[in-house]
Image: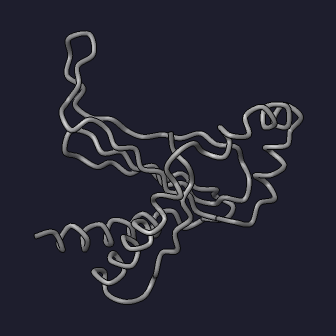
Amino acid sequence: MVSPMLVTVPTTGDASSRLLAVAGQVRRHRSDASGPPPIALLGGLFRPLAALGGFRWYMRHQQRLHTLVSHVRGPEESVHVAGRRVRAAVPVALSESGNITAYFEVLSYAGTVTVTAIVDPDHVPDLDELLAGLRDELDVLVALEP
């Protein structure tokens, strides 16, 4: 069971300081994000509202966030399907359109991390620059590893 966690990501300063700041926020808020998500607690109320279009309306009008990052921790060892080893897995998420302009899905699987970016092209017309910046930042973070 997962719940959303709002984290402010600093955009200035050196990579190590920014990473420490985010890690500190995650540590402080992790207990708040564990346990049943709000949607599970409100399931009986949520289902009829969703059926009436309430979820779509909310997603198009919410102002809490504009970027969503989701990390799924996959198995540390390769899995097999029908006797064949799964060599890689690519995370893909589908979501209600709204005012979240960028989704980053992160999947760790068998020692590899894969990131998928899904953006609203009307609000993020410079996807190539966004991906280049993401690659540069990930390279910096990998270089910090001992």
| Residue visible at 58% across and 62% down in the picture | 67
Q: Position of residue 77 (x, y in %)?
A: 18, 33
Residue situated in front as seen by the camera: 9 or 124: 9
For the C terminus, the image quarter is bottom left
Among the 4 quarters of the image, the one containing residue 83? top left
Image quarter of residue 14: bottom left
x then y, percent, for residue 24: 38, 74
Image point 33% across, 35% down: which residue? 89
Q: Is residue 82 left or right of residue 132?
A: left
Question: Hey, which residue is sitting farthest top in the picture?
Answer: 82
- Tell me which corner region of the image, top left, top right, bottom left or bottom right, holds residue 100: bottom right
Location of residue 70 with respect to 134 vertically, above or below: above
Say if 33 sits above or below 82 in the image.
Answer: below
Q: How far from the left and from the top, in percent, is residue 33?
A: 52, 54
The residue that appears at 18% across and 74% down in the rendered structure is 144
Residue 33 versus residue 75 in the image, above or below: below
Q: Nearer the viewer, residue 144 or 41?
A: 41
| Horizontal and vertical percent position of residue 104 | 48, 54
Residue lying farthest to the bottom in this orientation: 13
